[in-house]
Amino acid sequence: MSTVATSSPLACCKASPIVQSVVRWGGCFCGLSFLVALGVVFLAQDSGGGGSPDGTGNYNGAPQFFLADVGYKGVAYGPLYAAKQSCIVSYSDDCSTIFNDDISATWAKAMWTKSGRHDIANLAAMGANVVRTYGNDDRFSKREFLDELMQNKMKVVTGLSNVWYMDADQGCITKDFDCYDTIKQAYVDTLVVGEFVHDGYYHNAIEVINLMNEPNLNIGWYSACKNYLKAMLSALDGVLDAEKRVGVKAWINGTLPKFTATWSYADSSVPCHKPASCVDDQINVCGSDFFIKNPVPDSDECGPALTFVVQMYYVVQDPEGTIGYSPRNDLKAAFETRWVHSFNVFNQFSDIQRQFLTPFTKHPGLTGHKVFLAEYNPENYISASQTAGDIQKILDNSSHPALLGAAFFQYQVAYNKMGAERQWGLFELEPDTVMAKTGYIAGDKDKSHDINCLRLRDSEMAKAVATAYGGSLPTLALCGTASKGSALVV
C-alpha cells in the first residue's frame, strides 16, 4: 500500500542537455538557472526548494542518534492536499489528480512547519521519532523539511520515486529494468539539488533511503520474473556510484544511511502484467527457478515478504549467475553493511513473528540482518487498545532483536484514493476549512493548492499509537497559527 500520487507530466522547456539532466521531472525549471559542473549543482532560485549550503549544522557528519539504537517509532507520512474540497467528503475521478506528491519539498512547508499546521511537531508530541515518506521529486530541495525533523528530534525513511522505474518515457522499464543509469542520475540529482548531501556528508536526519516501494507488486512480472530483482540490484549499484560521483563520505562514526527495498506482505507471488507471457494472473515465485533453494511453503525461505527478502539475498551473492547483471560495485559488501530489510504489513505482531521473523532469523544467510515494518496497521484484526500492546511488542526486541520497529500507517487519509483506501488515517482534513496554501510547484498550472485544517479521525487509535510511543495526543492546534478560513501562505 502506498500514498504515492500521480504527477502530471508537462512538455519540457528547451534547455541544454546538462540542464535537462537535472530537470527531467514532469515540468521544467524554465525560470531557474543552474550551475552544473562536475556533478555539482547550485539552485539559484527557490521554486519548491532551495536554501544556501554551508556544510555545518545538520551536515556536520555527527547525527545525534540512530534509529537502529533506539528503535523505529514511526508514522507513514504522506499528507497530500485534496484536489478540491469536495474530495474530502466523497471521491470522484478528478480527486486522483494530484500534480506533485513530494511533500518534503518547500512548496508543502505550510503543512509541517511550526509556522504552518505543525504536522512534524504534532508527530513528535505523539512520541514518534521517524517519518516514512513517499514522493521524491529530485528537482526540489528537502533541506527545510530535514531541518524541521531534526529540530523535533526526528529522522526520515525517504526514498526514490516510482517514476524512475515505471514511467513509459523516463523509467528503466524502457531498459528491461536495468536501472543503473537511470537511478544513478536521479540519485545524483537527489543528493545535490535535493540537498541530501553537503560537503560530502548526508543530512543528519536521513536514516534510510528506500529504493522502491513494493517492487514485487509495482514491477512484478514484466516479460520475465527476474525484473523486480534486477531493478533493485541495478538500482543499488546506481545509488552507490551516485554517492561516489558526488563525493559522499561516511559520518564521523564511520557509518552511512542504509538502503532498503520495501516489499509487500504478499505470499510468494507476483502479478503478471503481461498476460500473453504468463499462464496465470499471479506467478508463484517460491521455487528453484526463482533462486529459492528450499521451495517449501512455510520454510525459512518462503512466506509473506520473506520470499522476496531471500531472493534478494541470493541474487546479491551471484548477480550474473542469477539475473545476468554485471555490477560495477561490490554489492555483497554493500548488502552486508548498508542494507536493512523492510516490508509493508497490515497484520498483528503474532502473525508477523510466526510468518516472517522466526524463519527470517533461522536463515543462515541473513544472520545479523535487520528489518523494520515500513507500513504497519493491524486495525482489521485487533482493536485500538490491543494495538498499543501490539506496538509495544514490536518495540520490545528482547525476543526478536532483528526487528527494529515500525511506521504506523498512516498520518492522514489519502483523499486521492477511493473506497477502502480511505479507511487509513489517524487524522483527516476538515472540509472547507482552509488554513494555508501550498507554495507554487514548478510546472503546475495552478499557483497554489489548499491546505486544510486537521482533526482526529480515529482518536482511540491515535491514543494507542501515542501511548505505545511514550507520547500523548497533540496539544498544538491542528490548524497551526492560522484561524479557520484564512489563507496563510508559507
Image: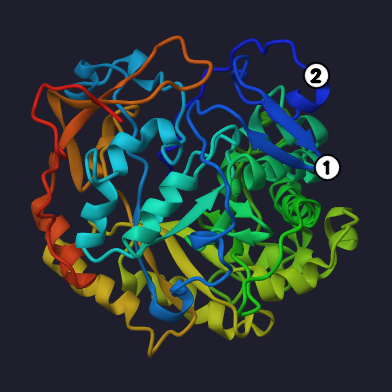
> In terms of sequence position, does the residue under pointer 1 or pointer 2 come before the other?
2
In the drawing, does residue 278 fall left or right of residue 150? right
Q: Is residue 138 above or below residue 255?
A: above
In the drawing, does residue 285 fall left or right of residue 425? right
Q: Which mark is residue 414?
A: none
Reading the image, the residue beneath label 1 is 38
Query: Between residues 337 and 31, which one lies in front from this camera angle?
Result: 31
Q: Position of residue 56 (x, y in %)?
A: 55, 60
Instruction: Decide: few, some or many residues near mark 1? Use Cα within 10 Å; few <14, some 14-19, many ≥20.
Output: few
For the point 59% across and 44% down, the residue is: 160
Tag 1: residue type? Leu
For the point 41% across and 37% down, the residue is: 103
Q: Which mark is residue 16?
A: 2
In the drawing, does residue 290 fall left or right of residue 81? right
Q: Position of residue 178 (x, y in %)?
A: 81, 43
Tag 2: residue type? Ser
Q: Is residue 320 above or below residue 88?
A: below
Mark count? 2
- The residue tagged with tag 1: helix, strand or loop? loop
Q: Position of residue 404 (x, y in %)?
A: 44, 75
